[in-house]
Amino acid sequence: MIMAKKMPIKILIAAGALGLSMQVPVIARADAARLPVIYDVDGAQSGDSEGKSEKAGNVSVAEALAKSGSGAGTLFGTKTREEYIAARDAAEGSSWGYTNLGISNVSDNLNIRALPGEDGKIVGKLPKNAACEVLEDVGGWSHVQSGEVEGYVKSEYLLTGLQAKIKVREFAEDVVKVGTDGLNVREEPGTDAPIVTQVATGEILDYVGTEDGWVAVMLDDETVYVSADYVEVTSELRTALTMTEVLYGEGVSDVRAALCNYALQFVGNPYVWGGTSLSKGADCSGFVLSVYKNYGISLPHYSESQANSGTRITLGQAKPGDLVFYGNGKRINHVAIYLGGGRVVHASSPKTGIRISNVNYRTPVKVVRILRD
């Protein structure tokens, strides 16, 4: 039962069947005030899967806080009771922007199908630990929305309710959102440091840390710096990938389409420096080497050497399957496979693994054609 009294608000999960208890915080939108809430969940009769864990004894947090004078659990600090109630109302029923949060509980990717059944067409992939909105349950299948994808996944591979809210704290990622075009990325914090490349507005970079007005980020497998004045540090959850991430233009050969679709099978797999395994781990050039090897084409295992293979073309001439190279201001140090539609697939970093990015997520320095058609 939740009652209001002048004490810090806590989250208490009592696993009655096991005689255990632990404390965890409530997850809410990154821009919402975080007001903890007391959970009193019986391990044998938990209603978590229905999303009912934010109530206790049918009394809402707002109702409990509105009561005064008796019981346990009151507020202290700089906010008034009314401000806490308003903050909690804004977040109640919501976790990271999801009303009914679902988390994929698989080792790689969870298929999203157009219809609830294994004969339904696959319309997307929900990567390991990615988030979705659970819309309804249909006979062992969950109707979900994630990113640009809507469809059905097997409910047994989805965490929901309190399980999802606890699990999400293990992998929610701090990221940096770029707020201006042509943002300089530098080797070290400071305007006198060499410029590595530039990134466009709206790009998402992996957050490393903050120091003296500069934000350290991971750009593929290197730590670099951007001015804190032009970025926002926030948290986000991964979402689904559509099966139409690759947008082919006219005249694209079957081998180009096949090569890109083959490469996309490994999105979400790990990055390993020096690796060439598409399943166990590869670095950027090892990923390209192994994808091309599947089509009988031999390439060296080094991005700068790969850049000297084939024929140089412009980005405007690029077709699916061509190679896009990036540099650090001194040399080429990264390579990706162009997918068409302004996107690339690449082995990015140990944190993100093999992923899809916008081709201009950083400034391309060279584009090379290996395939002949």
Image (spheres, rainbow, N blue to C red):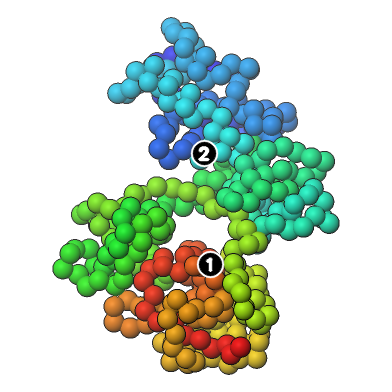
Kind of residue indicated by mark 1? Gly
Q: Residue at x 59, y 63 (%)?
A: 245
Q: Residue at x 17, y 64 (%)?
A: 191
Q: Residue at x 77, y 57 (%)?
A: 121
Q: Which mark is residue 341?
A: 1
Is 57 displayed left or right of 9 in the figure?
A: right
Kind of residue indicated by mark 2? Gly
Q: Nearer the viewer, mark 1 or mark 2?
A: 1
Could you say which is closer to the camera, residue 216 or residue 317?
Answer: 317
Q: Neighbour class for label 1 at 10 Å: few (<14), some, many (≥20)?
A: some
How far apart are labels 1 and 2 at the CA level? 28 Å
Q: Residue at x 47, y 91 (%)?
A: 311
- Which mark is first along the chain, 2 or 1? 2
Could you say which is closer to the camera, residue 187 or residue 144?
Answer: 144
Residue 275 seen by the camera: no
Q: Which mark is residue 97?
A: 2
